[in-house]
Image (cartoon, helix red, strand yellow):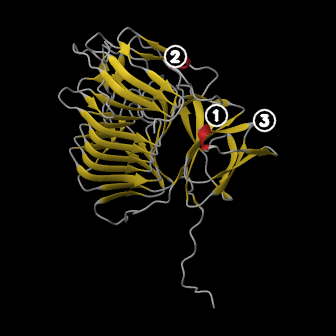
Amino acid sequence: MPIDSALPPAPPAALTWPAPAGEVASPDFREVSVAGVQLFVYQAPVRAEILSTGGLASHKPDYAAERASFVIFDMSAPVTVRVVPGRPFKTAALRPERAGIATRVEGGAVEFTLDRPRKMTLLLDGDTRSALHLFAGEPEKDIPAADDPNVLYFGPGVHETTGIALKSGQTLYLAGGAVLKAKLKPGDTGTYSEEWKVVFHHGSVLGLNNVKGVRICGRGIIDAGGIPHPGWNMLWLGGARHVQVDGITLRNAANWNFMIGHSEEIEVRDVRIVSGRLNSDGINSVNSRQVRIRDCFVRNHDDSIVVKTTATNAPAEAITVEGCTVWSDWGYALGVTYETRSPVRNILFRGTILKDCWGKDPERGLVRNVVVDGVTLYGKALLPSELNGADVKHDVRGVKFCNIRLAGQPPVSDVTGLALKTNAFVSEVTCSPVPAR
């Protein structure tokens, strides 16, 4: 039978986008290709040099920093990835290790096969400097029309903004190859804080204030390198409902990357974050409910994906974080952290409060029945972890560690192997080498 020429061609195994003019490629990799298609290698500052101000630590305007590289592509079938670094090397390894993806090194190049969309990092000779982050996503669905009056459409190229306030029912789309760069409004000199000894710049790149039914999506990049530290949030949600954020990359935040405040029914999927300045928290769910965060990559310099309740009488509830990859350069990677002034209810967390510059509340909380399951720690040594209750009435009880591994070793089989530090107000802590479920 003749081939039906009316049938649509099969989609390519990998979809990529050229970078906009003016975007400077990372010099650390001469070639990165997927399924034979060359990718543009973006770069981002990480581990920025810290300046002591006598108050809040900050950075010089021309701060020095290490460099991370990253590539963005979608894939619909297994693909071969080829990487040619810009320097000599002997070994190459992919993280996270539990993905089980082997590398092949030959002739100054690294090759490996990705079986499905993943967030992976390539390290050369075990060196965490000059890492290559690979952001492989699923093919986009429901791409909005550029001429839809409810769509803010940013096509390929560089775009500048002094901040965008989204309205209910709107969609903001960043196409692959689009870079949205934030800059201060003319005349914005900030506000000096005598307490913190720094100049604050208040605002957000994307603001969602008391809106509902908003979608932010695409394969483009939001860049806040033009905002001084400590400055804007990348995404700020306040009293928002039914919001979806999918597939975008956030680079070089000047303060918290993604703030979900007093909001409900929030879906965050496949968001990629690479930031190196201080206070660049990844995704903070604050006094919010029904938040789902999944398949994201977060590399930043402060808390990565955490739950907070900075306000009183506004519990945080039903927060789910799953399938995410976190590279923590500093700060807490996951969990309920400081600034817990209302109950936190999820997987039986309730929150604790420490007296410091963030937590000044007179009443402490308590922790009950927490499960930490399936965590792999990388490094040469197992660093200590701490569990501390405040007093007899505000204690920590019923923490279960399951299937905890130090890379390359069997699961830890008892509590003594965790290098765990506790105080007198901690009880019923157990450790098992098998998964909890």
Residue in the image at 37% along x and 30% along y:
231
Examine the image and state in which quarter residue 69 appears: top right
| Residue wearing tag 2 | 384
Label 2 crowding class (10 Å Cα cut-off): few <14, some 14-19, many 20+? Answer: few
Location of residue 278 in the rendering, given as x and y in whole percent from the top left corner: 45, 25
Tell me which numbered mark, 2 or 3, is placed earlier along the sequence: 3
Residue in the image at 30% along x and 13% along y:
195
Disc number for residue 130? 1
Q: Amino acid at mark 3?
A: Lys
Location of residue 128 in the rendering, given as x and y in whole percent from the top left corner: 63, 30
The answer to which of 374 and 215 lies nearer the viewer is: 374
State whether residue 125 is above or below residue 292.
Answer: above
- How far, Cα to Cα, is label 2 from label 3? 32 Å
Label 3 crowding class (10 Å Cα cut-off): few <14, some 14-19, many 20+? Answer: few
User: Is 290 on the left or on the right of 376, as rendered?
Assistant: left
Q: Secondary structure at mark 1?
A: strand
| Residue wearing tag 3 | 90
Q: Secondary structure at mark 3?
A: loop
Q: Quadrant of the N terminus?
A: bottom right
